[in-house]
Amino acid sequence: QDTFEYNLGVRPTHYVMTNFANFKGIVDSLDGVDVQVAKNFSDHCDLPQAVKTYCSVSPGTVHMDGATALWYVRARYSTSDFDRERRAQEVVRAIFAKTISLKGLQRLPELYTQYKASVDTDLTLADLLQVLPLAQQVAANPDLVKGYRVIPPAVHGYITPGGADVQVPDF
């Protein structure tokens, strides 16, 4: 929250964070997710489906297990950090859609308990129950959710001396 506020001048009301292992576990606990892939994508990977150390996906609905979803959101050799953000949003939407399809809203207390050890959040079960009516509206009409990303000219890409592709705010 502090980093977001420092860089963008807006403090998020709530947060949810997980690590890579728990991210894979969450996706696998849903028996995978159907990601609406926007663009052809190919990048280095070490997954079983790799062909000569590369994995690829084409536009359309692509079913991904946890390892594939993590590769898709983390891959960094063939695209920019900006593209990685777009792919991450695609996967988050797929996780929401799959949770809804499994009657996740009705199972919210059970799922909260199940995932509590996998995420760090300031949201309580009571907080989530309060937004349940909104979640039901979104489930009925996913177009209500708009995705935004911080892109140029608000930021510009930069490669650190260590080779990381990062975004630098244009204050």
Image (spheres, grey):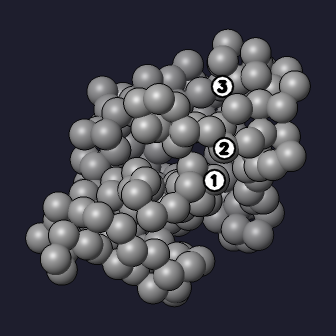
Residue displayed at 66% across by 25% down: 14
Q: Earlier in the sequence, mark 1 or mark 2?
A: 1
Q: Which of marks 3 and 1 is nearer the N terminus?
A: 3
Which residue occupies the foreground of this view, 72 or 132?
72
Q: Which quadrant of the figure has residue 1?
A: top right
Which residue occupies the foreground of this view, 162 or 108?
162
CA separation, marks 3 and 1?
A: 23 Å
Question: Can residue 143 be spotted in the picture?
Answer: yes
Residue count near mark 1 (Cα–Cα under 10 Å), binned few <14, some 14–19, many ≥20 = some
Front of the two marks 2 and 3? 2
Q: Where is residue 143 in the image (x, y as percent from the top left)?
A: 76, 69
Q: Position of residue 71 (x, y in %)?
A: 33, 58
- Secondary structure found at label 3: loop
Q: Residue 105 carries which label?
A: none
Residue displayed at 51% across by 86% down: 60
The three-letter amino acid code for the residue at tag 3 is: His
Name the residue tied to disc 3.
Answer: 14
Q: Which mark is residue 157?
A: 2
Q: Which quadrant of the figure has residue 23?
A: top left
Determine contact: label 1, label 2, CB under 8 Å.
Answer: yes
Q: Earlier in the sequence, mark 2 or mark 3?
A: 3
Name the residue tied to disc 1.
Answer: 82
Task: Please determine whether, in this image, residue 88 is positioned above or below residue 102.
Answer: above
